[in-house]
Amino acid sequence: MKIKIIKAVTCLILFTVPAISVVAQQKISLLKAVELALERNLTIKQAQFNEALSTEDLKQSKYNRLPDLGINSQGSFNFGRSLDQSTYSFTNERIFTAYGSLTSQVVLFQGGQLRNQIIQNKITLEADKTNTAKVKNDLILNVITTYLSVLNNQDLLTASRQQTEIARQTLNRSEISFKAGNQTTADLSQARAQLSTADLNVTDAQNALDQSILTLKQYLEIPPETVIEVEKPDISKISVKTLFNAQDVYNTAVSVNPDVRLAELRRDALAQAVKVAQGAYYPTLAMFASLGSNYSSIYQRVTGVDPITQQPIFFKPSVFGQLNDNFYQSIGVSLQIPIFTRFATRTSVRKAKINLQNAEVTAQLARNNLSKIIYQAVWDVQAADKRYQSAIQTYNSNKVAYNAILERFNVGLVNSLDLNTALTNLNKAQFDMIQAQYQLVFRSKVIDYYLGNPITL
């Protein structure tokens, strides 16, 4: 009975584990990788948070044009000589006083600071939106670069395993020939060394593939232990354009590239900051209004005069009656004219102008850097195309040479050293061709990125 239970559990585990592996594995295309990166990437979330903060700053700068409204109140016990707020006369009695008021003020003129601050915050918000777009674009380019790196390393791993199999077959033939006395110990050692080198190439290729997959997972915010399968397009069918005019590419890129746009928007925001700082030179004109009342524990209202003593007759009203008696309202305007502020305004204006000048230099550096990158990218794609065409010819030549030497080796016309040399040259030529092909695709996609074209494989 126990044996049957153990067998049942074992079968259940054997059938369940593969199913779990299949479920856990994710198949990811380039489009899916880009979507996951844009959805999960934390750097994008930080940029979006900054954008949200700028949105709130813009709202607040608009709200600053509205009147404010506040309530002021105070209550106190007074001992000794004190001022009775209800009669504005001094008394030596112990009294309790309280007063409250409702006040409001609206700024009518403040040197244009309110309006210029709104404009500045609008530009800052636009800059933060552009920065978010920049972060997204940079992430997309990094994801595509890493995705191509994964595909490249997969092909290199496949090629390395194929070369290992060829080296193993060569070693088998060498062992047979050695036993038959047709080869020396040196020939056999050469074949074994070739197989060891091929195995090492497989290990290196596997490590490079694992590292590129890990980097891709990090961009996609996928746990490292998650098994993913990268969907592989037919790289040979990808349309690759290699002829570009660098100046035309730059003229297009300068209008769509977020790096330049971001630098220009930040410059414009600092230009508005100068106007905001200069507004402090001007007077501030505001209109205010208030209403309120007060209460005193010794307050008495005069209701008449005693006809006999000719003394005033007092009456102590209720709390609400007293508040009604002392109720007051006011409305007016205030004007504040800055005369001397210890050069604080001048310093603020000068610092704002320096920041503006620095931003103008930064914007020009962004344009210069973009021009340099564009020209270099155009040269790189042209060089990559020439390198790929040369790599194809080199691979085909080495393949023909290896096949010819292999035929001669099989009939004993060449030794194992010549065969191993030909195999090494073929391996290197194949690796170079694979890398040149992916390098060409990558360089072409970089141009598409700066042109603002959708990047697909």
Image (spheres, rainbow, N blue to C red):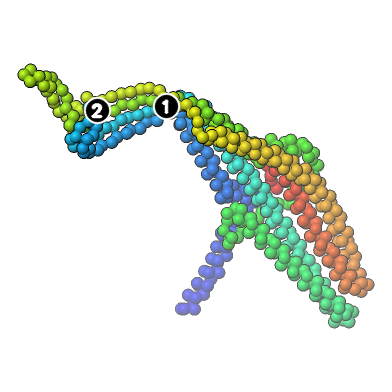
Cα gap from disc 2 to disc 1, whole angstroms: 30 Å
Density class for disc 1 (Cα within 10 Å; few <14, some 14-19, many ≥20) is some
Counting every numbered tag in the picture gives: 2
Q: Position of residue 423 (x, y in %)?
A: 84, 66
Looking at the image, which is closer to me, 363 or 137?
363
Which residue is disc 1 drawn over? 106
Density class for disc 2 (Cα within 10 Å; few <14, some 14-19, many ≥20) is few
Q: Does the image show residue 169?
A: no
Q: Quadrant of residue 96?
A: top left
Residue 166 circle label: none
Q: Position of residue 200 (x, y in %)?
A: 74, 69
Looking at the image, which is closer to me, 229 or 128?
128
Looking at the image, which is closer to me, 182 or 299?
299
Label 2: element kind: loop
Residue at the farthest right position: 413
Q: Is residue 253 above or below residue 153?
A: above
Left or right placement of residue 315 versus residue 406 in this view: left
Residue contact between numbered discs 2 and 1, judged by CB atoms under 8 Å: no
User: Going 51% across and 35% down the picture, which residue do you hit?
Assistant: 342
Residue at the farthest left position: 308
Left or right placement of residue 352 versus residue 66 in this view: right
The tag earlier along the polypeptide, 2 or 1, is 2
**Amino acid marked by disc 2:** Tyr
Label 1: element kind: strand
**Amino acid marked by disc 1:** Val
Which residue is disc 2 drawn over? 88
User: Going 80% across and 45% down the picture, which residue do you hit?
Assistant: 379
User: Going 54% across and 31% down the picture, which residue do you hit?
Assistant: 276
